[in-house]
Image (cartoon, rainbow, N blue to C red):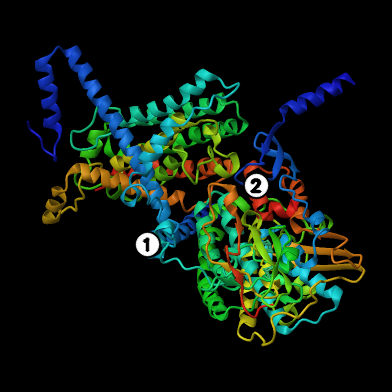
Amino acid sequence: MEEKVKNITTEEQQEYVINMGPQHPSTHGVLRLVVSLKGETVKSVQPHIGYIHRGIEKMCESITYPQVIHLTDRMDYLSAHINNEAVCLAVEKALEVEISDRIKVIRTLMSELTRIQSHQLWWASFGMDLGGLTCFFYGLRDREKILDIFEETCGSRMIVSYNCPGGVMYDLHPDFAKKVKEFIRYFRKILPEYNQLLTGNVIFHERSKGIGNLSLEDAISFGITGPSGRASGFSCDVRKHEPYSAYDRVTFKEILYTQGDTYHRYVARIEEMWESMNIIEQLIDNIPEGPFAVKMKPVIKLPEGEYYQRVETARGELGVYVISDGNKNPYRVKFRSPNFVNLSVLNHIAKGFKIADLVAIGGSLDLVIPDIDR
Amino acid sequence: MPFDIYNFTSFTQWIDSSLHNAMSPFWTALTEMVIIGVLVLMFYAVVGLFLVYAERKVCAFMQNRLGPNRVGPFGIFQTIADLVKLLFVELIPIKNADGFLFNLAPFIVIIAGFMAIAAIPFANGLHAIDMNIGVLYVIAVSSMGVIGVLLAGWSSNNKYSLIGAMRSGAQIISYELSVGLALITIVILAGSMQLSVIVEAQRDGWFIFKGHIPAFIAFIIFLISSTAETNRGPFDLAEAESELTAGYHTEYSGIKFAFFFLAEYMNMFIVASIAATIFLGGWMPFHVGPWVGFNHIMDFIPPFVWYIGKTFFVIFLMMWFKWTFPRLRIDQLLTLEWKYLLPINLVNVLIMAFLVLMGWHF
Amino acid sequence: MRSIIEYLKEIVFGVWSLMQGMKVTGSYFFRPSTIVTQKYPDNRKELVMYERFKGEVVMPHNEKNEHKCTGCGICELNCPNGTIEIISKTIVTEDGKKKKAIDKHIYRLGMCTFCALCVKTCPSNALAFSQGFEHAVFNRALLIKTLNKPGSQLMKGVE
Ligand code: SF4
Ligand code: SF4
């Protein structure tokens, strides 16, 4: 008995525990990872969350539905538009409003632009995580072009608050189509450069291939969605399986790989950028005419009941679950945020790899901390 | 006063002899040491500051940015402003740090750099000391810096620092081999370890051209392993900003941090000037055998300019590496050394020895 | 022999892939025309924001110092953050009727999240967004603004 106790202490003494975060360059926000190391090898990772908890779900209970939307911007600030859309779709589903084709197309276009800019920022910061600082500036340089398009139409760059129940806030700017086409032309030239700089690089291959493998079974049982899940072969694209907005009228590939390592999570996102550009090109030339918003009642009251809507954000599946008791405020709102779920797998896949790999794996899961804490 | 920008030998000898005439040998030696010390110190500071500025500009241009552009025209005084700020910044005392070692570490790093500069021939006859084992001395001295890094990491009492320092130790000890072997390749070709003789031997062509492919391979290997030895990206594992925040100098602040910072750039300058001296002919102008007219024009450019030009070319290459590549992982770093660079290097030395034996070089 | 060829292939491929990356950064280095940095405080004059840019909420007044706000309080109701506070007063119109009117339309810039709900829902279109984005001040109290100008009146014909 005594012997056993002694063993545990020596074992524990050998462990080298470091705190990554809450302020750490590669946690991309205030996430704290308690990492036990043996030498440089990670023995376990324990995420501690809640540093940026704002109680968004609770706040939603005291405000009206149109007001909820601007809070959802602040969960996953890189998929702001898609989050907005999710709430709007849930409300529209509850009220059974028919929205026009124009609104659907506008929303789809905006979602795909959001996805591209989110992936651009992810590429930038992933490159930086691996030590290639130049990637960061190239990614941000190109993202700026999308943000300019957003700014022209929505009035803000990142926290767009562009949706409202029944449509969108403003009509598309007259220059929108022209600028988007210009951007697509530009980005089709730039994306191969990303590949030259990072994807094809032998150091990058060494750093990412075979690192942080996630099997299909684990991906499903942990509920990993988005490009991270699809890299493991989990066909989970909500746009394909439960098309919302205008996704049923475009053709696009669901990017699926089976290896599930850091490299394929990376490639899945790069490929998604190509697919998003394809989707945009299919829609941009024939945006239907019509009103940009359906007239809604000034005070929106959802009929009593429970409503659920899922959408595909840049990081995975976002679910919005609204319970209404017939009032103008929701009774309860629950967000199934993709990042919270994706974070849960970190310990599972980072175990046994080096500390540098932990950074790479964390980067490849593409975590946005405010979405985890909400 | 015999001053000639093409040959400093008579100038330095003139200073030496006039000092000898004025005072006893002991005082002469002392005065010379002080003069050289002050000169090297000034050189160190100026080059360090300039390199910081150059790096910021180079990386900015590679990244589609402007870089520093506020302080002075094109921001040239930015680094001086930064240095002044660092001088005035509070030195934060670290609880439970090993005070003596903690303070000693930056100096060791700096001193290693100083000592290496002494042996470098900047121009014809412009060097502090010309040892007959110059190459060996430079290798030995420049690797002393790792002691400072190890001490810094150990004494900071910080886990990140310790990991960084240990990485740095493993890294520098391994890459030292490659640096040494790459230089040996050229020593075989030149037949001497004396830096001035090596430079002189390149009068009719730089070694990188004279030594066929082996010299070129040695140059590439030297570039890679010296980048690793100076802890610069993509081998900056000791700092590994995204993993270890700042690695071994996480806990340093103010002027002590500035020492580490400057030392990094000075080390880069030193390895670049060694590369320039040994592979690219030092201060020797670029000569093409039979083209007399061309050679005359090249001779017209002062040797010091040649030397600086070559050094900065190598420095630019190293900056280009740093701002393009992602970082390696520690085990890959060691794999690269032991499985790729070292075997190639050994074969390379053999080939070079064979070439020299057969007299197949130019 | 085979493994040696593999080994050499690996090295050649590795070096080649690294050169690809260097080509990208190098090409940008020698093309300073691609620099995207804006010299911000220097280019203030040329810098034009998009017309829809949500800088801060303002209440446009015409040259006769009239605005369109009736003091109905809908914007206050719709603001999710309690940014807006309407202080109304009762005035007597020319034909002797008592009427509610705006006294102070208080807007706390520090609390605004630029969701545009107030601007969208105002029944008389009294609010708008300005393009100014330089909001920094030295005193927090300066962020609390009164949107209707002193002495301003309701525009004719707005109910
Ligand atoms: S600004 Fe518009 S909504 Fe607000 S009180 Fe005035 S009229 Fe009513
Ligand atoms: S923009 Fe939104 S937060 Fe700001 S005052 Fe208007 S309603 Fe309130």
x then y, percent, for residue A129: 59, 49
Is residue B144 visible from the viewing direction of this image?
no
x then y, percent, for residue C41: 42, 57
Q: Residues within 10 Å of mark 2 (few under 14, many from 20)?
A: many
Residue at the image position 65 percent from the left and 84 percent from the top: A287
Is residue A319 visible from the viewing direction of this image?
yes
State which image quarter holds ligand 2.
bottom right
**At label 1, which amino acid type do we have?**
Pro
Seen from the viewer's position, the closer of residues B296 and B244 is B244
x then y, percent, for residue A23: 63, 41
Q: Residues within 10 Å of mark 1 (few under 14, many from 20)?
A: some
Determine whether C29 is above or below A271 in the image: above
Residue A90: numbered disc = none
Residue at the image position 70 percent from the left and 53 percent from the top: A370
Q: Cβ of disc 2 within 8 Å of ligand 2?
A: no
Determine whether C152 is above or below C42 in the image: below
Lateral position of residue B15 relative to residue B354, left or right: left
Residue B265: quarter of image: top left
Q: Chain of mark 1?
A: C
Q: Quadrant of the N terminus of chain A?
A: top right
Q: How many marks?
A: 2
Q: Mark 1 falls on what kind of element? A: helix
x then y, percent, for residue C3: 56, 53
Lateral position of residue C129 relative to residue A370, left or right: left
Which residue is label 2 attached to? Answer: A27
Seen from the viewer's position, the closer of residues B265 and C152 is C152
**At label 2, which amino acid type do we have?**
Thr
Seen from the viewer's position, the closer of residues A371 and C120 is C120
Determine whether A47 is above or below A308 in the image: above
Residue C24: quarter of image: bottom left
Which residue is label 1 attached to? Answer: C32
